[in-house]
Image (tube, rainbow, N blue to C red):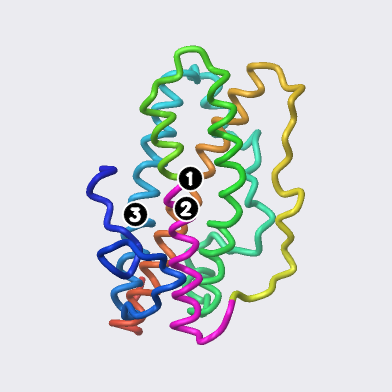
Amino acid sequence: LFTVSVPLDCRDDQASLARCPSISQEKLLDRVIHHAELIYRVSEESCSLFEEMFIPLPLRLQSNQGGYACITKALPIPSSKSEIQQLSDKWLLHSVLMLVQSWIEPLVYLQMTLDRYDHAPDMLLNKTKWVSEKLISLEQGVVVLIKKMLDEGTMTTTYSEQGAFQYDVQLEMLEYVMRDYTLLTCLKKDAHKMETFLKLLKCRQTDKYNCA
């Protein structure tokens, strides 16, 4: 899976996307979607692997009952299908960008905290690192896409990333485990949301009136 990922860069020599805006809008959107698909798939695998290794069933049920909030809960992004359908292309793109940027720092934290686990498999560590790197690449792609599709820079929002994610070195080990499990679970949900938004945007480019 890691080797088949198509580079988001616009040239075969992997030049920086920011320095190479010559790729077509359609091709760039396809590559951004492909990145989002892979990020969702790998985040789903990471969450399942972590769950199998460290989370007994009662704690899984506790997490599913909403005892832990996602770090992106405060973002002004709708979750219902009807509300998402009403989003403009502009807001779809900026919503994806907000989600991507919100996860860059927490994934750096997650890579560090996983080192505290006994018997944490290399596969889990590698997947987490891979997603972290691909999120940065996806961020670059979405920024260029915003410039191409909207002919503008990134939109200023009232949401502040400062303080959105708080470190706490005083947690007990069980709390560490549940916090990391919550991070992975929420990452999987948000990665799916990124993919959904981008595919809706793609659909609107080809069949504006029949995008469900």
Q: Main secondary structure of the magenta part?
A: helix
Image position of 163 with respect to 182: above or below: below
Check whether the beta carbons of the residues at disc 3 and disc 1 lie within 8 A of each other: no
Marker disc for residue 37? 3
As measured in the structure, the alpha-carbon distance from the residue carrying label 3 to the one carrying label 1 is 14 Å
Give the percent coordinates (x, y) of residue 2.
29, 43
- Left/right placement of residue 135 relative to residue 69 reads left
Between circles 3 and 1, the one closer to the viewer is 1
- Left/right placement of residue 203 relative to residue 112 reads left
Q: Is residue 210 visible?
A: no
Q: Around disc 2, counting alpha carbons within 10 Å, would you say few (fewer than 14), some (14 to 19), or many (20 or more)?
A: many
The quarter of the picture where residue 182 lies is: top right
Looking at the rendered image, the quarter that the N terminus falls into is: top left
- The residue positioned 56% from the left and 34% from the top of the image is 110
Is 150 magenta? The answer is yes
Between circles 3 and 2, the one closer to the viewer is 2
At label 1, the amino acid type is Ser
As measured in the structure, the alpha-carbon distance from the residue carrying label 3 to the one carrying label 2 is 12 Å
Q: Which residue is mark 2?
A: 135
Give the percent coordinates (x, y) of residue 184.
51, 37
Which is nearer the eye, 103 or 49? 103
Image position of 65 with respect to 212: above or below: above
Determine whether the residue tagged by mark 1 lies in a helix, strand or loop: helix
Magenta segment: 132-153
Determine whether the residue tagged by mark 3 lies in a helix, strand or loop: helix
Q: Earlier in the sequence, mark 3 or mark 2?
A: 3
Marker disc for residue 132? 1
Which is nearer the eye, 21 or 191? 21
